[in-house]
Image: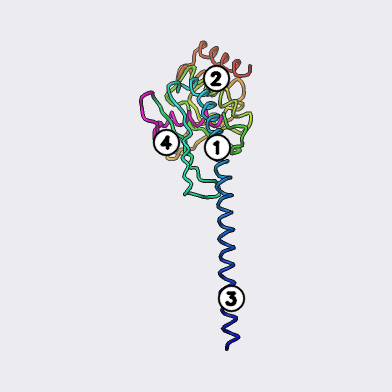
Amino acid sequence: MRERYASDVAAIDAGEEQLAVLQQAMSQADAAYAKVAWTLSKRRKKAAAALDAAVMAELPPLKLERARFITEIESDETLRDPAGFDRVEFWAQTNPGTKPGPLMRVASGGELSRFMLALKVVLADKGSAPTLVFDEIDTGVGGAVADAIGQRLARLAERVQVMAVTHAPQVAARAASHFLISKEAVGKADRVATRVAPLDASPRREEIARMLAGATITEEARAAAARLLEAAVR
């Protein structure tokens, strides 16, 4: 009996020593984590400043010259995970004098699309999804702004596959491939089918002329379509 009690006491003493060892190891690991996390936070803030400047440079041609893009970083040492203790969110200020806020809440649908396009263009060489889809990113804009959107989509397409649904001839003319999407009645017109047809050079020019002129395609519209296509390959 005495030997058993002695063994239990020895185990308790050893447990206390082991606990002290574990506590010391935890303290060392915590200090090491904090050091690395603060280093990561400093680098993250430096990268955020560079990202903000690069995105801001893309905004004026996209008719967002009065807007600001802000990478908001909040550091809280009590919130720890494998990515550090920073919480990162993209913010925007769409007009001077307005309060900045989270991009997803502050920007309208069209503004959000253009902010995302600027971000994708800036980050194109940093890795991306293999295919990006933009659905009517040109809504509410035209002329030079639509052309600027087309140019940026073309730049982005040099690195990833880009699919864009558009009604803007300036955007369509910048594409490497052009598909016409239409709806047609099937059978006794009780069903509708969506058709997708690739367009080669001549039909493509005609479609872009239609996008420019509307229902009645004029020779002036065809000439303007030809100029858009020529400008896109320069």
Res 179 → quadrant: top right
- Between disc 4 and disc 2, whose residue precedes? 4
Q: Residue at x 46, y 45 (%)?
A: 76
- Between disc 4 and disc 3, whose residue precedes? 3
Q: Is the magenta stretch mostly helix, strand or loop?
A: helix
The N terminus, quarter of image? bottom right
Closer to viewer: mark 3 or mark 1? 3
Closer to viewer: mark 4 or mark 1? 1
In the image, 190 versus 213, the foreground residue is: 213
The answer to the question of whether label 2 and label 1 lie on touching residues, with beta carbons closer than 8 A, is no
Query: Is residue 136 in sight in this rendering?
Result: no
The answer to the question of whether label 4 and label 3 lie on touching residues, with beta carbons closer than 8 A, is no
Q: Residue 206 carries which label?
A: 2
- Between disc 4 and disc 1, whose residue precedes? 1
C-alpha gap between disc 4 and disc 2: 42 Å
The residue that label 3 is drawn on is 11
Q: Give the range drawn in magenta.
A: 96-121
Asked which secondary structure carries label 1, the reply is helix
The crowd level at tag 1 (other Cα within 10 Å; few <14, some 14-19, many 20+) is few
* Amino acid on which the number 4 mark rests in the picture: Pro
The crowd level at tag 3 (other Cα within 10 Å; few <14, some 14-19, many 20+) is few
Q: Which residue is drawn at 63% across and 28% down?
A: 158
The spot of residue 185 in percent (x, y) is 46, 35
Asked which secondary structure carries label 3, the reply is helix
**Up-down relation of residue 18 to residue 139 (above or below):** below
The C terminus, quarter of image? top right
